[in-house]
Image (cartoon, helix red, strand yellow):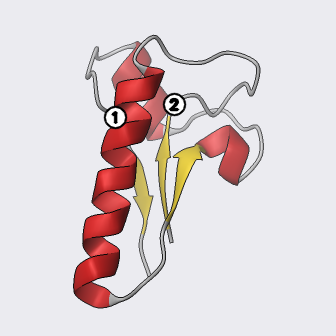
Amino acid sequence: MFFSRPWGYTSSELPSNFKESNAKAKLGAEAIEKVHGTKWTFGSSAQILGIGSGGSEDWTYGVAGIEYSYCLELR
């Protein structure tokens, strides 16, 4: 299970809000683990799954302008 954030299409570019976005993903992962005992991974989808295009977190961040965009892979 993982929290992925932009970018998925590249591993060499970071979003402008990388530090804040990563910190919030970490908080979310830790909160779920605390309640359910499940371990979550967080990071860019390129880091977790490998480079790929068409991720919803990339579109919502890059096109729709949603500052904190994530895709959660659920159990």
Q: Residue 21 at what x, y percent from top left?
A: 37, 32
Label 2 SS: loop
Left or right of residue 3: residue 13: right
Q: Which mark is residue 39?
A: none
The answer to whether 69 is drawn above or below residue 33 in the figure is above
Q: Residue beneath label 2, please?
A: 6
- Sequence order check: which comes first, mark 1 or mark 2? 2
Label 1 SS: loop
Q: Which residue is pictured at 68% across the width and 52% down the height?
A: 48
Left or right of residue 28: residue 70: right
Q: Quadrant of residue 47?
A: top right
**Cβ atoms at labels 1 and 2 below 8 Å apart:** yes
Q: Residue furthest bottom?
A: 37
Number of residue marks: 2
Q: Residue 12 at what x, y percent from top left?
A: 76, 19
Q: Residue 53 at what x, y percent from top left?
A: 66, 32
Q: Which residue is pictured at 58% across the width and 28% down the height?
A: 7
The answer to whether 52 is drawn above or below residue 66 in the figure is below
Q: Alpha-carbon neighbours of circle 1 within 10 Å: few (<14), some, or many (≥20)? A: many
The answer to whether 22 is drawn above or below residue 33 in the figure is above
The answer to whether 52 is drawn above or below residue 48 in the figure is above
Q: Residue 67 at what x, y percent from top left?
A: 27, 21
Q: Nearer the viewer, residue 24 or 55?
A: 24
Please, what is the three-letter code of the amino acid marked with disc 2?
A: Pro
Q: Nearer the viewer, residue 28 or 59?
A: 28
Q: Which residue is pictured at 38% across the width and 13% down the height?
A: 63
**Cα gap from disc 1 to disc 2, whole angstroms:** 7 Å
Q: Residue beneath label 1, please?
A: 69
Q: Which residue is pictured at 58% across the width and 34% down the height?
A: 54
Please, what is the three-letter code of the amino acid marked with disc 1?
A: Ser
